[in-house]
Amino acid sequence: MTLAELRQQLATFDHLPGDTPVVLANSAEGNGFSPLAVIDDALYEAHNTYTGDWYATDQMRAQNPENDWGPAPYGTVPALFLWPTS
């Protein structure tokens, strides 16, 4: 899903009140659920249609030099990451 697609889908829920919880499924099968905690932008490297890896941006590495983040590999793309509470 792209950010444009997400925005389009979220627009269909404009009728819901602002305090409506946002909850993430722990798996595609719905084996568990956790409230959305953080939305972050970083870099993504897809391994296949289902999985991939998160990488820090150059800006994130510059702002947090104490972290041991290596550079992102070639082919990563900017992405939004939705982090669950647990």
Image: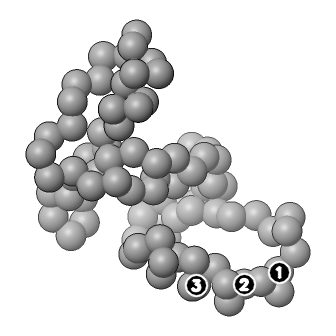
Position above or below: 12 against 30: below
- At horizontal 86% and vertical 64% (from top left) the residue drawn is 19
Q: Is residue 24 left or right of residue 15?
A: left
Mark 2 falls on what kind of element? loop
- At horizontal 52% and vertical 64% (from top left) the residue drawn is 25
Mark 3 and mark 1 residues within 8 Å of each other at the beta carbon: no
Whether residue 64 can be seen here: yes
Three-letter code, disc 2: Phe
Residue furthest top in the image: 66
Q: Is residue 10 left or right of residue 4?
A: right
Residue furthest left in the image: 74
Q: Residue 54 or 43: which is nearer the viewer?
A: 43
- At horizontal 40% and vertical 21% (from top left) the residue drawn is 62
- At horizontal 32% and vertical 47% (from top left) the residue drawn is 43
Quarter of the image with the N terminus is bottom left
Q: Residue 22 or 31: which is nearer the viewer?
A: 22
Where in the figure is residue 11, as x and y percent of width and height? 67, 84
Mark 1 falls on what kind of element? loop
Mark 3 falls on what kind of element? helix
Where in the figure is residue 42, as x and y percent of width and height? 39, 45
Mark 1 and mark 2 residues within 8 Å of each other at the beta carbon: yes
Please give the residue where the numbered disc 1 appears in the rendered image. 16
Estimate the spatial distance between the alpha carbons at disc 3 and disc 1, rounded to whole Å.
13 Å
What is the quadrant of residue 70 in the picture? Answer: top left
Mark 2 and mark 3 residues within 8 Å of each other at the beta carbon: yes
Q: Is residue 77 left or right of residue 61?
A: left
Whether residue 52 can be seen here: no
Where in the figure is residue 16, as x and y percent of width and height? 82, 80
Please give the residue where the numbered disc 2 appears in the rendered image. 13
Position above or below: 85 against 33: above
Estimate the spatial distance between the alpha carbons at disc 2 and disc 3, rounded to whole Å.
7 Å
Three-letter code, disc 1: Leu
